Amino acid sequence: MKIHFLKSNWNDVIIIESNNNYILVDTGFEDKYNAINDFFKKRNVDKISYIIITHFHLDHYGSLEKILNNYKVDNVIIKEYSGLDITDADGKTTTEEYRNKEYNHYLDIVNLINKKSKLIKPKEKEIIVFEKLKLIFYNTKNLIKDSYNDKTSKDYKKIKYNENYNSLVLQIEYNDFNILLTGDITDNEEENNIMSKLNYQIANIVNKEIDIYKVSHHGDDKNNSQETLNIYKPKYAVFTNNYNEINNNNNMIKKLKKANNKVKLLYAGDSNIEIEITDKIKTNTNC
């Protein structure tokens, strides 16, 4: 199998390849369509087995509509947008007008999926077998919506969280290798225990060392706690960001090396990355 991280700063485009069948995990901003199209055209691919959208932020779903209109897509896995996010994909405070517009956009996309493909709403720890891969989904509930509607919660009827709290996390098992694609899952401490340190909560469920770890939220320090990394002990850590951004602005490198001092760091913000997994892991950044 191969994992391709297309060159991306502050957005995700990840392609899983197995026996000439493909899964696309997130589609980046709308302007990433050309890079995605070039990737598939170069390989004479006109069908995608699965598209997985981790959460409804523009830097993760931006090219989805163009892909659905230009490729045969067998299945789309997408989580319901909460319509309650306090900030958008750029971190700007949202308005009710924005949230309503975005929710209507989500409904339009769901309608398009139902016309062009098959919509799948994943269940917690659901396993999908794809070729020789086992896909396992975490954080499948709409925690933001549940918390907002829970009369016993401190968050009742409060616009408090951004959509990253709703991000799916995908674990891929292949032979003896474990890959974790974290989307933008959060790791902040919150008063509401259900919403607190979600990445760490998932790490305790996975409870395995991870061979390839997609660093959550493009390498944001707050989304990857030391406690989480100490469980995963990543052998390879992939940033959907560039070297300068990560090394100049946060503490992530130190934390990763504390968890595993032999960790190898890869930056999809600087180049495409291809990771081939056979009985070992081989990386290529000149692709």
Image (cartoon, rainbow, N blue to C red):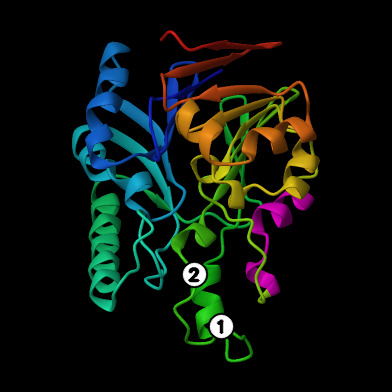
Q: Are marks 1 and 2 in contact (CB under 8 Å)?
A: yes
Label ID, residue 161:
2
Q: Give the range drawn in magenta.
A: 193-205
Residue matched to label 1: 155
Q: Is residue 3 left or right of residue 108?
A: right
Q: What element carries label 2?
A: loop
**Quarter of the image that includes the N terminus:** top right
Residue name at image x 55 percent, y 31 percent: 247
Whether residue 198 is situated above or below residue 156 in the rendered picture: above
| Relative depth, front residue between 234 and 63 | 234
| Relative depth, front residue between 55 and 246 | 246
| Relative depth, front residue between 118 and 93 | 93
Residue name at image x 62 percent, y 24 percent: 132
In 3D space, how far apart are the residues under numbered discs 1 and 2 (Cα atoms)?
Answer: 9 Å
Main secondary-structure element of the magenta-colored stretch: helix
**Residue 4 placement (x, y as % from top left):** 46, 22
Whether residue 119 is situated above or below residue 266 in the rendered picture: below
Tell me the amino acid under the disc marked 2. Tyr
